[in-house]
Image (cartoon, helix red, strand yellow):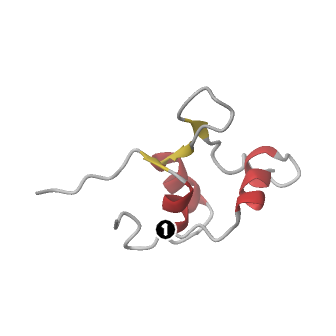
């Protein structure tokens, strides 16, 4: 049985991947031009149309950001 990588990751999954920052700083990196001078962290997407819908990030974009900024990805980020 093969384990496939997920296509999207939520906040808990982002932290499991090794993301060192909190929610507020993550939002700053996504949307504040003062913090995001190099394009910033990949924007999140919502799973629904409601304003409190669950937010997720595309794994490929997050991994590309990690690689571009020299951040390590933990080995067990897809563990349950």
User: Which residue is at 89% across, 52% downward?
Assistant: 34
Q: Return the residue found at the far top.
A: 49
Residue 54 higher or lower than 17, as above or below: above
Which residue is label 1 attached to? 16
Give the structural element (helix, strand or loop) at label 1: helix
Q: Return the residue found at the far left.
A: 1
**Along the line of sight, the residue nearer the viewer: 47 or 27:** 47
| x, y percent for residue 69 | 63, 63
User: Which residue is at 78% across, 44% downward?
Assistant: 31
**Along the line of sight, the residue nearer the viewer: 54 or 36:** 54
Number of marks in the rendered image = 1
51 relative position to 17: left or right: right
**Along the line of sight, the residue nearer the viewer: 48 or 44:** 48
User: Which residue is at 32% across, 53% downward?
Assistant: 5
Residue 24 higher or lower than 44, as above or below: below
Q: Is residue 3 visible?
A: yes
| x, y percent for residue 46 | 58, 36
Quadrant location, the C terminus = bottom left
40 relative position to 56: left or right: right
| x, y percent for residue 72 | 52, 72
Q: Is residue 67 visible?
A: no
User: Which residue is at 69% across, 67% downward?
Assistant: 21
53 relative position to 16: left or right: right
Residues packed near mark 1 inside 10 Å, few (<14), some (14 to 19) or many (20 plus)? some
Quadrant location, the N terminus = bottom left
> Where on the picture, by quarter, is residue 49?
top right
């Amino acid at each position: 049985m093969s384990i496939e990588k997920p296509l999207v990751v939520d906040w808990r999954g982002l932290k499991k991947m090794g993301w060192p920052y909190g929610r507020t700083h993550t939002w700053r990196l996504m949307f504040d031009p003062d913090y995001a001078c190099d394009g910033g962290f990949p924007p999140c997407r919502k799973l629904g149309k409601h304003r409190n819908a669950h937010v997720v990030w595309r794994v490929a974009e997050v991994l590309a950001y990690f690689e571009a900024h020299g951040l390590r990805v933990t080995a067990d980020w897809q563990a349950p």
